[in-house]
Structure formats: C-alpha cells, structure tokens
Image (cartoon, helix red, strand yellow):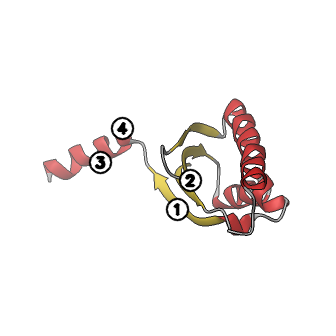
Amino acid sequence: MLFMLKAHLSKPQSMSNKEFYSVWLKEAEAAMEARKAGAIKAIWKVPGKTEVIAVMDVDSADTLEAAILNLPIWKLGYSHIVTNLEWTLLRPYENWYEDLKKLAAE
C-alpha cells in the first residue's frame, strides 16, 4: 500500500536549534535507511518550511504504525515536535484508468 506522508515539525521555544536539528538529523538518518530498504519510495523537504513529504510503501496500517513508533523522534521522546502528520492512501493511476474505461462505457 502506498501512502503519502506530510510531516510538519515545530521547534519548541525551550529547545535549542542544536537539539532540534540533532533530533531531525537522527530522523533523517533513519529515513535514508528506509529509503535504501525500499519502504520509502521518495522523500522531500519543503523549502522554507519544517515540513517533509514522503511516499511510503507498507503492507498494512499496522506496519505503518509500527514504523512510526520506531522512528527516532518517537523513541527518544520528541514526538511533541511533530505538530501534524497527514496520511493519504495512494492508488495506482493505472488501476483507476481501467476502472474509468468501464465507468465511461456504462
């Protein structure tokens, strides 16, 4: 199952830049490993924002939940800096195209 993730981060005022970016670096290292392993198909940092967008391939919502809980931000107790996670289930357009041909013929 393909999912698009939008993760919005926010640095608390009480957190130093060094601490914030150090945590983000650990998260980025985990993301690069997941990219190499194929779980993350593509990943981007939105310019000028503390936002990351990724396309992930997982077999179930349970696998997705386990992956989230094993991210450094969660394991190290920094989940509060993730102010919003948005998940969108993605369907291959080729599959929709086949359905669309049938729908248009009715």
Q: Position of residue 43 (x, y in %)?
A: 56, 39
At horizontal 78% and vertical 45% (from top left) the residue drawn is: 26
- Nearest-to-viewer mark from 4 and 2: 2
Residue that carries the numbered disc 2 in the rendered image? 50
Q: Are marks 1 and 4 in contact (CB under 8 Å)?
A: no
> Label 3 sits on what residue type?
Asp
Q: Quadrant of the C terminus?
A: bottom left
Label annotation for residue 94: 4
In the rendered image, the vertical position of residue 29 relative to residue 12, given as above or below: above
Residue that carries the numbered disc 3 in the rendered image? 99
Q: Are marks 1 and 2 in contact (CB under 8 Å)?
A: no
- Nearest-to-viewer mark from 1 and 4: 1
Of callouts 1 and 2, the N-terminal one: 2
Q: Position of residue 105 (x, y in %)?
A: 14, 48
Q: Nearer the viewer, residue 80 or 94?
A: 80
Q: Nearer the viewer, residue 104 or 67?
A: 67
Q: CA distance from mark 4 to mark 2?
A: 33 Å
Q: Are marks 4 and 2 in contact (CB under 8 Å)?
A: no
Secondary structure beneath dot 3 equals helix
Residue that carries the numbered disc 1 in the rendered image? 86
Of callouts 1 and 4, the N-terminal one: 1
Q: CA distance from mark 3 to mark 1?
A: 27 Å
In the shown orientation, is residue 103 left or right of residue 84?
Answer: left
